[in-house]
Image (cartoon, rainbow, N blue to C red):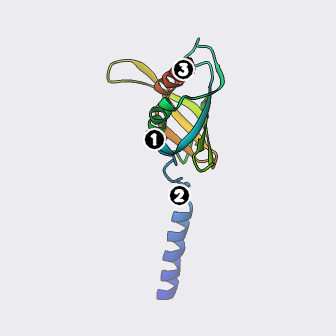
Amino acid sequence: MRLLLLLLTFLLAFIMVSCQPHMPPAAEIPPATSIKAMQANLAEFPEGSPPLEEFSVPAEYFEEICLALLAAEPDPEPSKWAVLGYIEITTNSGERLFFSLYTTEAFTTEDGEQHTGLAFRTSKTDYYRGGDATELARLLRQAFESQ
């Protein structure tokens, strides 16, 4: 009887752990100093802004863009998001990292401004949510214009 109770307890614990949603690890965002190149494109965001075709991001923007991505946390149950664009990073070692960018819900900043949340999917198909799509779009537009 004790053995049966022990087996049932183990089985129940196994089922509970197995049913938990997959929680991806923290996003692998390389430090700016290890980035050789960064390509990006941007959809029509904010609304009314022209879309940006793929362009090379100048190196002086690498750190700020990486910091914008680091604000995101794993999202085991992503929603359907609107496409914002993408960023492709090539590291000094030749590794290529791809980030599909999305917009999420609107929020109000401490200054009372309306911004839109950021989410992204990595080339490993893990999803992350957090950060500020409005700020990232501003950085990308500024990087595009500085070329």
Query: Which residue position holds label 1?
Result: 70
Q: Give the amino acid at mark 2.
A: Gln
Mark 2 against mark 1, which lies toward the viewer? Answer: 1
Earlier-in-chain disc, 3 versus 1:
1
Q: Is residue 74 visible?
A: no
Mark toward the viewer: 3 or 1: 3
Question: On screen, 57 above or below 89?
Answer: above
* Residue for point 56% across, 63% down: 18
Q: CA distance from mark 2 to mark 1?
A: 24 Å
> Which label's residue is closer to the chain start, 2 or 3?
2
What amino acid is found at the position of numbered circle 3 in the picture?
Arg
Give the vertical position of 88 relative to 42 (above or below): below
Of 132 and 64, nearer the camera is: 64
Q: Residue at x 54, y 48 (%)?
A: 76
The kind of residue on which mark 1 rests is Leu
Label 2 sits on residue: 20
Regarding residue 126, the answer to whether it shows in the image is yes
User: Along the horizontal axis of the image, is 45 left or right of 115?
Assistant: right
> Secondary structure under badge 3?
helix
Query: What residue is shown at x 53% (from left), y 58% (from top)?
Result: 20
Q: Nearer the viewer, residue 8 or 138?
A: 138
Which residue lies under the disc numbered 3? 141
Instruction: Give the residue furthest to the left.
Output: 110
